[in-house]
Image (tube, coloured by chain):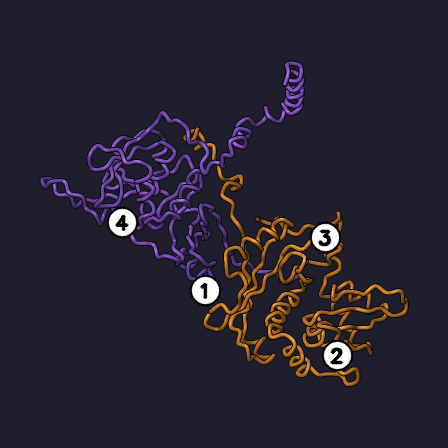
């Protein structure tokens, strides 16, 4: 399918987005979070962060985490994914994390903590950094049967344009994952996503080795971006004139 | 049943049919199909044709020479070699299936569809069954389909005027290469439907088709094949038991947002 550009959810929403660049809101979040005493704590496979109204507003505006609805007014609670937690801690350098509920952890220990929990964490984090550092909003793609969905600005303003599938290969270009191994995987991804007006974006983390340190991960891998598009010849676009041949077939 | 009951049932049936009459009337072909459990056709338009051409199979070159040319379809089908028109087995298969071509063997015997289809699947003639199915799918939609990298028209000046006419097999058959099983093969140059198409000057194709085997291509393969196609867009075709689907994997560059 060919997307004709972002689908804004309301009449002036494109202007609202233009007047509120995401990079600026993220800068405000960085300041607010750095000044906050609150530290994220592991909870299940995610992280819990206790917040106050100003921080809550900024986390919502930058679409990090999921706010847990409570009946409390003075404090709010956010659930952050491992990628979001690590990105705020390592890349934006503003989130404090505590594992044992006492000491604050540093980036190397947090990296090891994340890796021990999930061997695929480095790959997903690399893809997450790639997308977030371009100021796209990144949310989980479970509903669409993919890894992530990305938005050009806040999800309240615009529909997501891409459904993201993450794949990876070593430095010889040998595919290392079981993603998209058989044809039905491709048919499935494309069908599911085209049905909700999203293009499938395949992010390939190239040059990945299992034992990479954090700096090696960021410096020695490249993220390749390709779209997976199904072409339906019978729905060829209007510049395809088929009238000339109709006479032959009837 | 007595007479009264019969007419009662008939009356009810008439009323039911009347109520559904509009539906039935709208699509009698589909109703017939459903009532007889008929599958939908792999090709629409297989009807009695008035313009039928004739070709003779030439085993040495794995192609047929067109001996009676009828209809405007030849403007975009078949290749010209030294002034003569030849067609590949997939073209023969398609035209024979829609009744536009009769194929003769080296005598005067007409070759039936079974023999023609078997030749399509034979692999000796640069075609496989899946290759043929992809060809048929695109051709029936009006696209102009040629074998990748093979010229539509060629002149050859080496024939000596006084010798017996011999067929220069290499020249005509353009080195039929056997398709590698399971691998990705560039197979077709596709031109969008165009009434001004000229075999002597076709121009660059609109896109190239790569037939892929059992496994989707990996990034490295996609890049390699794209390089071979230079700037012509590449589409990947997968044929699965008659179901022909196309994908492309264009590189994109997600913009850095403000």
Q: Chain of mark 4?
A: B
**What tint does the image give chain B?**
purple
User: Which circle's residue, 2 or 3, is located before the other in the chain?
Assistant: 3
Q: From this view, report whether residue B24 is shown above or below residue A114.
A: above
Query: Of tags 4 and 3, which is closer to the observer?
Result: 4
Task: Tell me the residue that label 4 is attached to.
Answer: B174
Neighbour tally class for label 1: few under 14, some 14-19, many 20 plus, Cα within 10 Å: some
> What is the drawing colour of chain A?
orange
Q: Which mark is residue B220?
A: 1
> Depth-wise, is mark 2 or mark 3 nearer the camera?
2
C-alpha gap between disc 2 and disc 3: 36 Å
Which residue is identified by label 2?
A97
Q: Secondary structure at mark 1?
A: helix
Task: Answer yes or no: are tags 4 and 3 on the same subunit.
Answer: no
Asked where in the image residue A94 lies, by quadrant, the reply is bottom right
Residue beneath disc 3: A14
Pick whichever, A249 or B19, lies toward us. Answer: B19
- Disc 2 is placed on an element classified as strand
Tag 2, which chain? A
Which numbered disc, 3 or 1, marks the residue closer to the eye? Answer: 1
> Badge 4 local density, few (<14 within 10 Å), some, or many (20+)?
few
- Determine the CA span between mark 4 and mark 1: 29 Å
């Amino acid at each position: 399918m060919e997307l004709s550009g972002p689908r804004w959810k309301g009449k002036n929403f494109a202007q609202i987005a233009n007047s509120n660049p995401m990079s600026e809101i993220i800068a405000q979040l960085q300041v607010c979070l750095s000044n906050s005493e609150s530290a994220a704590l592991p909870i299940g496979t995610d992280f819990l962060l206790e917040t106050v109204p100003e921080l809550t507003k900024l986390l919502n505006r930058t679409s990090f985490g999921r706010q847990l609805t409570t009946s409390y007014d003075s404090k709010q609670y956010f659930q952050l994914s491992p990628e979001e937690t690590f990105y705020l801690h390592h890349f934006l350098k503003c989130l404090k994390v505590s594992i044992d509920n006492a000491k604050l952890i540093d980036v190397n220990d947090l990296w090891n903590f994340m890796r021990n929990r999930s061997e695929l964490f480095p790959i997903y984090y690399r893809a997450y950094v790639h997308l977030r550092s371009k100021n796209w909003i990144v949310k989980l793609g479970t509903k669409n049967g993919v890894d992530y969905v990305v938005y050009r600005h806040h999800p309240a303003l615009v529909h997501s344009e891409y459904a993201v599938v993450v794949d990876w290969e070593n430095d010889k270009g040998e595919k290392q994952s079981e993603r998209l191994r058989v044809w039905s995987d491709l048919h499935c991804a494309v069908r599911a996503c085209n049905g909700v007006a999203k293009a499938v974006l395949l992010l390939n983390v190239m040059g990945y080795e299992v034992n990479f340190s954090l700096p090696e991960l960021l410096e020695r891998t490249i993220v390749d971006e390709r779209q997976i598009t199904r072409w339906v010849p019978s729905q060829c676009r209007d510049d395809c004139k088929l009238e000339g041949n109709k006479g032959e077939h009837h | 049943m007595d007479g009264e009951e019969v007419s009662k049932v008939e009356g009810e049936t008439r009323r039911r049919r009347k109520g559904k009459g509009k539906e039935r009337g709208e699509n009698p072909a589909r109703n017939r199909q459903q009532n007889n459990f008929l599958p939908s056709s792999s090709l629409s338009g297989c009807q009695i044709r008035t313009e039928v051409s004739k070709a003779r199979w030439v085993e040495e070159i794995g192609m047929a020479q067109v001996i009676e040319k009828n209809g405007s379809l030849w403007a975009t089908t078949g290749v010209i070699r030294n002034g003569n028109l030849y067609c590949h087995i997939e073209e023969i298969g398609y035209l024979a299936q829609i009744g536009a071509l009769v194929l003769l063997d080296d005598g005067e015997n007409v070759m039936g569809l079974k023999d023609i289809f078997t030749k399509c699947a034979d692999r000796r003639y640069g075609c496989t069954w899946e290759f043929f199915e992809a060809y048929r799918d695109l051709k029936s939609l009006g696209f102009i389909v040629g074998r990748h990298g093979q010229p539509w028209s060629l002149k050859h000046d080496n024939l000596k005027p006084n010798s017996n006419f011999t067929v220069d097999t290499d020249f005509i058959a353009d080195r039929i290469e056997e398709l590698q099983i399971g691998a990705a093969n560039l197979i077709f140059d596709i031109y969008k439907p165009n009434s001004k198409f000229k075999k002597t000057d076709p121009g660059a194709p609109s896109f190239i088709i790569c037939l892929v085997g059992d496994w989707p291509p990996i990034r490295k393969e996609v890049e390699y094949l794209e390089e071979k196609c230079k700037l012509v867009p590449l589409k990947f075709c997968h044929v699965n038991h008659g179901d022909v689907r196309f994908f492309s994997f264009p590189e994109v560059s997600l913009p850095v947002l403000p």
